[in-house]
Image: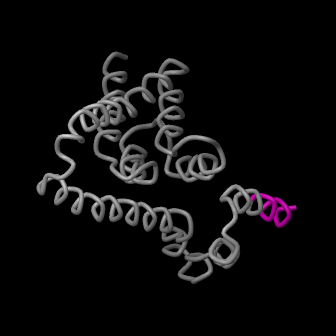
Amino acid sequence: MMNEWFILIAEFFKTGLFAIGGGMATLPFLYEMAGKYDWFTVHELTDMLAVSESTPGAIGINMATYAGNSAEGLLGGIVSTISLITPAIIIVMVIARALEAFKKNHMVLSAMEGIRPAATGLIAAAGAELFYMVLLHADEYGQTGTWTSLLSPLELGFFLVAAVLIFVFKKHPIVYIIGGALAGILIGL
């Protein structure tokens, strides 16, 4: 039991420490956790992503709360969430103290030039992984060999319509999430 708590704390602390770039940058870490532990499945991760995008808070925090709650109940949810945010709090406090003294330092400026594209790469990789998890069904394709089992025309349609609408109308993301949910309900009826 104590080992489970240590693992929960360590995994979410590590995620909080290295997921530079925000909530979406936690996805590679969360995907790895889904494969290693029984806190949540990959399918639950994709469902939680959809829910997290439509609720306040970052996906990493929402998933930490969900996974901790699944593993160890309410206290587990609280502990895993605190474990995830603690590195950011520590880092921001240290940086805030040092920023004024080093804000014109060549090495600090150069480090930031390297961190920004690295964080963007983490987010892009998470997006590609999410695309693969949600839209490509390699297992079904391996069984049937048909392209419609690999890539559902309906899911692809939802994806393309949402992408076009987002670029054209630039509404709040909740509009598209609610629209997708309503469309899914109507089609499922």
Quarter of the figure that contains the C terminus: bottom right
Instruction: Please determine whether, in this image, residue 162 is positioned above or below residue 74.
Output: below
Residue occupying the point 76% across, 57% down = 178
Residue 185 belongs to the span the image colors magenta: yes
Give the percent coordinates (x, y) of residue 127.
46, 64
According to the image, what is the colour scheme of the structure?
one colour
Instruction: Provide the residue span drawn in magenta.
Output: 181-189
Residue at image location 45% in from the left, 30% down from the top: 81
Q: Classify 178 as above or below 70.
A: below
Residue 7 percent coordinates (x, y): 32, 28
What is the x, y in percent for residue 12?
A: 36, 35
- Image position of 2 (left or right of 102): right
Rendered residue at 39%/38% (across/down): 37
Give the quadrant of the N terminus: top left
Q: Quarter of the image holding residue 100?
A: top left
Which secondary structure dominates the residues rendered in magenta? helix
Q: Which of 135 and 49 is in front in this view?
A: 49
Which residue lies at the image location 36% right of the left edge and 21% below the top edge? 5
The picture quadrant where one finds residue 107 is bottom left
Total marks placed: 0
97 is higher (above) or lower (below) than 171: above
Q: Is residue 97 magenta?
A: no
In the foreground, 166 or 35: 166
Q: Position of residue 173 (x, y in %)?
A: 66, 59
